[in-house]
Image (spheres, rainbow, N blue to C red):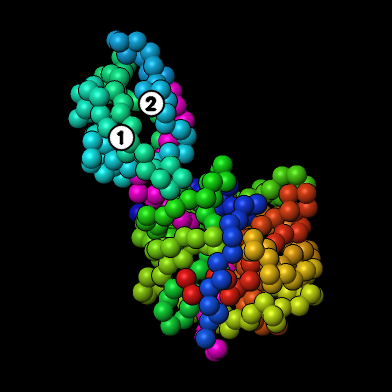
């Protein structure tokens, strides 16, 4: 039976307004062939720990309290070990809390790249008898984004064109990531002051690719052997130096699973931009404007093609004008 899992672009892989410093990857060797992306994919990412998303009071026989907050934990912290044992999942954290038997225990927390040790005494919840520290948590994030390219020879892909962000726009690190085939089943149109989003549905139990790297320029990995590229268009790339103001095309999936070409205009080329905002693009395609209102969340990674060459990917949307957005030069994504 196929897994049917709804995904919303805004949960994870949105066209966002946050991007770190540019990473200048080497351009591809002349003549390197790529399959053109544009297909939307569902991503399931693990940060190799348990993330705190909120706090709540625990009612116990000893009184009411929140041990995690009182010990100095903060939302966004990643609990990576309890009493020296690695905790990668919610289940492993629950088991670790049960083993404490209500005794003071050392927790290892990762915050902003640094590791902190904290001593907590879990409380026994009067409702279910389980030991808790007063946190709401998650161990994975899921969402949708767009594949930009797949190198024909190696099967390596690049997607998104920007750092992976959660709802708070906090840049995420990556431990494990599976990539699934995704069908777009609905669109929330973009309006001035409000970014729209794609709504997708995962179609397979087995991933079509695995991601192994996330950085300021996107998410990268390798497609599984046997993936059907028979209908994929083959392109070569062109550097920012060859990009010009004028007509171009983006490839995006805003309905079903098949990418479509949509007309855009490149209004500005800025090869030296250190925020990876190398293009300003404007959607001119009447079909896309009618369906989405312009650029929406989930379209990040949509390849930009000019004169038959892949020159970049869509990354950001202008909140005050969803018909306009930014793009990253393709050479900044290659080589990852």
Overall secondary structure of the magenta stretch? strand
Residue in the picture at 31% in, 26% down = 120
Q: Does residue 241 show up?
A: yes
Is 100 placed above or below 201 here? Answer: above
Residue in the picture at 43% in, 38% down = 77
Q: Earlier in the sequence, mark 2 or mark 1?
A: 2
In the image, taking residue 321 as reference, residue 199 lies left or right, namely left
Residue in the picture at 36% in, 74% down = 225
Picture disc at residue 71: 2
Residue 55 position within the rendered picture, expressed as x and y whole percent measured from the top left: 45, 27
Is 283 placed above or below 196 here? Answer: below
Residue 34 position within the rendered picture, expressed as x and y whole percent measured from the top left: 52, 80
Label 2, label 1: how many angstroms apart (C-alpha)? 10 Å
Q: Residues within 10 Å of mark 1 (few under 14, many from 20)?
A: many
Q: Are marks 2 and 1 in contact (CB under 8 Å)?
A: yes
For disc 1, the marked residue is: 107
In the image, taking residue 105 as reference, residue 329 lies left or right, namely right
Q: Of helix, strand and loop, which one carries label 2?
A: loop
Picture disc at residue 29: none
Is 160 placed above or below 110 here? Answer: below
Q: How many marks?
A: 2
């Amino acid at each position: 039976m196929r897994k049917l899992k709804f995904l919303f672009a805004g949960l994870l892989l949105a066209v966002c307004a946050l991007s770190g410093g540019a990473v200048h990857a080497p351009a591809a060797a002349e003549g390197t062939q790529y399959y053109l992306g544009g297909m939307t994919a569902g991503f399931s990412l693990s940060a190799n720990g348990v993330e705190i998303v909120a706090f709540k009071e625990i009612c116990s026989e000893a009184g009411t309290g929140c041990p995690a907050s009182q010990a100095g934990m903060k939302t966004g912290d990643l609990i990576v070990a309890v009493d020296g044992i690695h905790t990668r999942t919610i289940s492993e954290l629950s088991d670790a809390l049960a083993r404490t038997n209500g005794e003071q225990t050392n927790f290892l927390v990762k915050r902003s790249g640094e590791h902190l040790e904290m001593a907590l005494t879990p409380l026994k919840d009067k409702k279910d008898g389980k030991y808790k520290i007063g946190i709401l948590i998650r161990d994975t994030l899921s969402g949708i984004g767009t594949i930009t390219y797949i190198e024909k020879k190696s099967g390596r892909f690049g997607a998104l064109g920007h750092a992976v962000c959660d709802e708070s726009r906090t840049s995420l690190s990556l431990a494990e990531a599976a990539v699934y085939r995704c069908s777009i089943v609905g669109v929330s149109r973009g309006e001035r002051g409000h970014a729209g989003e794609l709504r997708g549905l995962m179609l397979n139990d087995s991933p079509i690719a695995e991601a192994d790297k996330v950085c300021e320029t996107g998410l990268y990995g390798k497609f599984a052997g046997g993936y059907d590229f028979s209908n994929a268009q083959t392109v070569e790339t062109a550097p920012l130096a060859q990009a010009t103001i004028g007509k171009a095309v983006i490839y995006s999936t805003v309905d079903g699973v098949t990418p479509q070409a949509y007309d855009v205009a490149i209004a500005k080329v800025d090869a030296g931009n250190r925020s990876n905002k190398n293009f300003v693009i404007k959607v001119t395609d009447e079909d896309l404007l009618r369906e989405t209102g312009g650029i929406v969340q989930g379209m990040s990674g949509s390849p930009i093609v000019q004169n038959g060459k892949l020159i970049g990917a869509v990354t950001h949307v202008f909140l005050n004008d969803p018909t306009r957005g930014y793009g990253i030069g393709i050479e900044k994504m290659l080589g990852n």
